[in-house]
Image: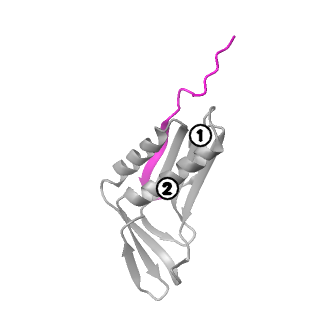
Amino acid sequence: MTSLTRRSPAAHRVAIAEVCEDVADPGRCTAAVGDPAGGAVVSFSGVVRNHDEGRSVTEIEYVGHPDASRILSEVAAEIAARADVEAVAVQHRLGRLVVGDVALAAAVSAAHRAEAFSACAELVDEIKRRLPVWKRQVFRDGSHEWTGSA
């Protein structure tokens, strides 16, 4: 008789935690969290939109603190350590992005959908709260503004 366990040997892993200047790839994040024990994979793409509070946005620039990679890894590890999470993958872009570019890609696998949705939402919220990345929005009229969170 074969003994089945819920957890695969790779459970609670951080598959990707990157602050990058090239591409944040939602497909790569989703593929990276695949796990035999994961019955649900939830992904998130934070995309540069063309407006903010009624103003037309043309581009965004993200500038990161030297500790940004370490903090992103810590947040990913905290979410991955949850009892119901199999794997986490997350990438945050730095540099100049235009409308339609992915600024944040994330994916979480868990045994069940509710846990996967919850963990992915918490991952994104914690990154927005804790990651030392500043955003400069450039508006169609040429003005810009800085905000202190991703």
Kindly indicate the quadrant of the structure image that contains residue 134. Answer: bottom left
Amino acid at pointer 1: Ala
Residue 38, above or below 98 = above
Within 10 Å of the Cα at label 2, are there few (<14), some (14-19), or many (20+) other Cα atoms?
A: many
Question: Which secondary structure, mark 2?
Answer: helix
Task: Tell me: 135 left or right of 9.
Answer: left
Residue 21 visible from this viewpoint: no
**Residue 31 spot, x, y in % from top left:** 60, 44
Amino acid at pointer 2: Val
Give the residues in magenta.
1-24
Position of the N terminus, as image quadrant, is top right
**Residue 105 spot, x, y in % from top left:** 53, 55
Within 10 Å of the Cα at label 1, are there few (<14), some (14-19), or many (20+) other Cα atoms?
A: many
**Residue 18 spot, x, y in % from top left:** 43, 50
Q: Which residue is mark 2?
A: 124
Residue occupying the point 49% across, 36% down: 13
Alpha-carbon distance for marks 1 and 2?
16 Å
Residue 110 is marked as 1
Cβ–Cβ under 8 Å for marks 1 and 2: no
